[in-house]
Image (cartoon, rainbow, N blue to C red):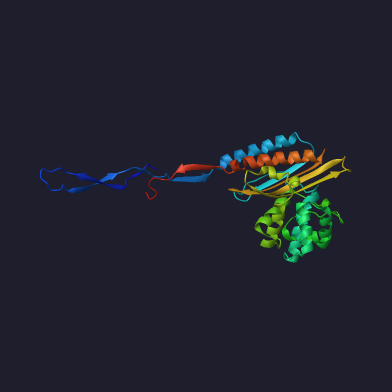
Amino acid sequence: MRREWLWPVLVVTLVTAGCGQERAPVVSVAVQAPVKVARCLLKFPDKRAGVVARARLERDIARYVHGRSGRIVYGALDLVSGVRVGQGEHEHDLITASGAKVDILAALLSRKDGRLGEGELDLATRMITESDNSAADALWSRVGAGGGMSEFYRRIGLRETTPGPSKYWGGTTTSPADRIRLLRALVKGGGGLSAADRRTVLGLMERVQQDQAWGVSAAARAGDRVALKNGWTPRPFIHNTWAVTSYGRVSGPGRDLLVSVQTDRQPGEGTGIQTIEGIARLIGARLDDLSPVITRPCPTDPIA
């Protein structure tokens, strides 16, 4: 668009000298002062650049994972842009460990229409924010153990999640894709969860104590809000390795990112945490590159 200049009118008084004593006539003259007009710009998605950026990110994560131990799968969805990335996100034989505690609370709320007693709310708070196993045992029983959880998973559409056997809620297996489905339901609704239920769960996930706030929180920018739940457990019967998982929501200006990273056969808890945070950091830092835009000036004569 051509730059246009608007000229507001300023009144200047000109005095014409005369020979007599009569006062000179006052004449108003229009004087124009320049004011710059903002340019009109249009923005369009740059799909080709987005495809290239996605391929580059997935390649770089694959290189990172190749140098790490054990089995590693991940998935991510940004609810603002609709961008998805992942690798092995439908593998569903990895255990959640304490990650299943969010499932337990969501299932309990959906059965009780959000009306938790004072004792149940205390158990739920300790189960999520402190990862208290005794609290999880109590609520697992109240929700109906494996049978009750299977019903909840069917209702909410988690087709790749299987509850742990008997009293072993930590043996629940799932996939990154199902973790993201659960997170999406907590954000957008579904599975019989009311808005109050969802606020309860996400609110507790935002209050996880600091020493358990590692993992997908590495995707956050300064000022972003993080709601997450992690799981970690030794696997003495699988070559003395560890299973370490993290999933959650990272939200802030321009993004609402759901991320899940699951690992097993890790040589130690610390190695699993480091791997998860490396993947989450790559996704968080380069998410905006996956939905680039082209900027063009507006037409000068849109009617013609």
| Of residues 179 and 203, the one drawn nearer to the viewer in this rendering | 203
Locate residue 283, reporting x and y percent.
Answer: 66, 41
| Quadrant (top left, top right, bottom left, bottom right) of the N terminus | top left
* Rendering coords of residue 21 (x, y %): 12, 46
Q: Is residue 152 above or below residue 227?
A: below
Q: In which quarter of the image is residue 238?
A: top right
Q: Is residue 145 above or below residue 249?
A: below
Quick check: can you spot residue 256? Answer: no
How many numbered circles does the render carry? 0
Q: Where is residue 149 in the image (x, y as percent from the top left)?
A: 79, 59
User: Which residue: 62% across, 40% down?
Assistant: 286
Q: Which x, y percent locates residue 132?
A: 81, 53
Residue appearing at x 63%, y 47% in the figure: 224
Q: Nearer the viewer, residue 175 or 216?
A: 216
Picture quadrant of residue 139: bottom right
Quadrant of residue 142 within the rendered picture: bottom right
